[in-house]
Image: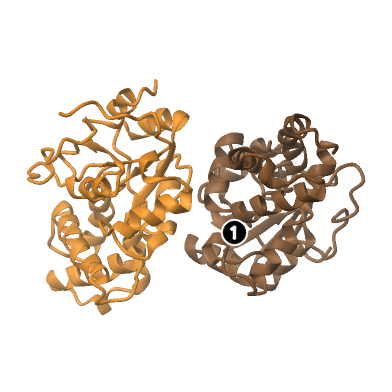
Chain colours: A orange, B brown
Amino acid sequence: MSDPADFSQLQLLGFDVFGTVVDWRSGVARAAAPFLARHGIDAEPHVFADAWRARYQPAMETVRSGARPWTRLDVLNRENLEDVLARYGVEPDAIPAAELDELNRAWERLDPWPEALEGLARLKRRFAIAPVSNGSIGGMLRLARFGGLPWDVLLGAEMARDYKPKPEVYLASIAAAGYAPAEVAMVAAHNQDLAAARALGLKTIFVRRPHEHGPRQTTDLHVEQDWDVVADSLLEVADALGCP
Amino acid sequence: MSDPADFSQLQLLGFDVFGTVVDWRSGVARAAAPFLARHGIDAEPHVFADAWRARYQPAMETVRSGARPWTRLDVLNRENLEDVLARYGVEPDAIPAAELDELNRAWERLDPWPEALEGLARLKRRFAIAPVSNGSIGGMLRLARFGGLPWDVLLGAEMARDYKPKPEVYLASIAAAGYAPAEVAMVAAHNQDLAAARALGLKTIFVRRPHEHGPRQTTDLHVEQDWDVVADSLLEVADALGCP
């Protein structure tokens, strides 16, 4: 590690959400289980969740690359659901659209990691806290109300109409909140997210989430740069930032 | 009153903020008092606040009319401060810019009306709550942190890069949160704001704030249409919407 980072200017903490704050895999599997059973789809729910999620980055990439105009994550997830069902041999037209819409809302009903609410509450006493997520504002709103996430403001992809790790997402989010990059830290369980934030002058806080992708996770188990803070939970982040 | 409104679809309450939720006049006067004394400006602080606020609608109108490109309220307030000081015979250049910036932040340090926090807490248990204000996202963020306003999401002018009562502000705010107009109610102390919201299909909730403009207020003392709810406080709004 290099010299300890100087957090004296810090005002705003921007959080990655899916994986860093909430456990998307368990939540999506929980919603998928009765759906899969009802339709006789032979898929283990967590594997189904992984397959659905595997389409997440490629779908966002079509927007990032400019091949496709701005499209909110809710819409991409809904399309990806039809793709993954097709892979399991299900004709999407065989299932009422309203039922697919309902399953798609699983992404708005994800449990926070066990310590996340306490960690956010401690951090919020001193810093403004906000999602800087690829989720939509509406999706972040309903996710926060489902899980009790006490955000001060909802930032992220929709502020720039593009997806992380494109710099515009961080910069538009910071600008909307009225801060300079040096006044902001990005908190994420993903090295790539922090690399993009650091390149813009934000502070970086890595939270290890070694089970985001289940028991056999291979990604983001280790830090790839000397992030300003490395922690195993949001409580440790609060400790590191002096938030009792 | 006509038949009671049907609130069964209601999901989101959008609030006017300046005047409806927070007492801007007292807060601006409180911040202005030591500034005026320090610079020997012969102005009663509440009268100074009124004079500053009087430039609010004309400044926004330059944006609404298209005469001026999108400009955030923080910037308009800062310009208006120089205008009002000039009227009091003060050369703005005689005062350091940082001091004017600091006084301008008075708009982010306004007390909620006495019952507002309890009312919002009750309403938030059942509905998503959001400012749909002409203030900026950053201004709303700092105002919420100053006063403890428990917003779920910050909406308003910046979502449309235009100012209320232009329909785009309401429509962009609702769209960002992912709701239909019939699922949203506007809560405001100003008839004009509710008239614009009703024209778009939103429900309308009028909260009387007869001292927003001080003891001799003449505007918005009475309802101008049969709004869906008329109340004297946010507690009465919570009562009317069945939020114990």
Which of the 4 image quadrants contains residue B101? top right
* Residue in the image at 57% along x and 69% along y: B69
The x and y percentages for residue B165 are: 69, 66
Task: Give the quadrant of the C terminus of chain A.
Answer: top left
* Residue in the image at 71% along x and 34% along y: B31
**For this view, does A6 lie left or right of residue A225?**
right
Depth order, front residue of B152/B90: B90
Task: Answer yes or no: is residue B244 visible.
Answer: no
The x and y percentages for residue A54 are: 16, 60
Task: Answer yes or no: is residue A129 visible.
Answer: yes
**For this view, does A216 lie left or right of residue B14?**
left
How many marks are shown on the rendered structure? 1
* Residue in the image at 54% along x and 60% along y: B158
Depth order, front residue of A118/A182: A182
Considering the numbered disc 1 on the image, is that residue within a helix, a strand or a loop? loop
Which of the 4 image quadrants contains residue B167? bottom right
Q: Chain of mark 1?
A: B
The x and y percentages for residue A16 are: 30, 47
Label 1 amino acid? Leu
- Classed neighbour count for the residue bearing mark 1: other residues with Cα under 10 Å, few (<14), some (14–19), many (≥20): many
* Residue in the image at 30% along x and 33% along y: A114
Depth order, front residue of A187/B55: B55
Task: Give the quadrant of the N terminus of chain A.
Answer: top left
**For this view, does A131 lie left or right of residue B51?**
left
Depth order, front residue of A42/B203: B203
Q: Residue furthest top?
A: A244
The x and y percentages for residue A138 are: 44, 58
Q: Which residue is mark 1?
A: B10
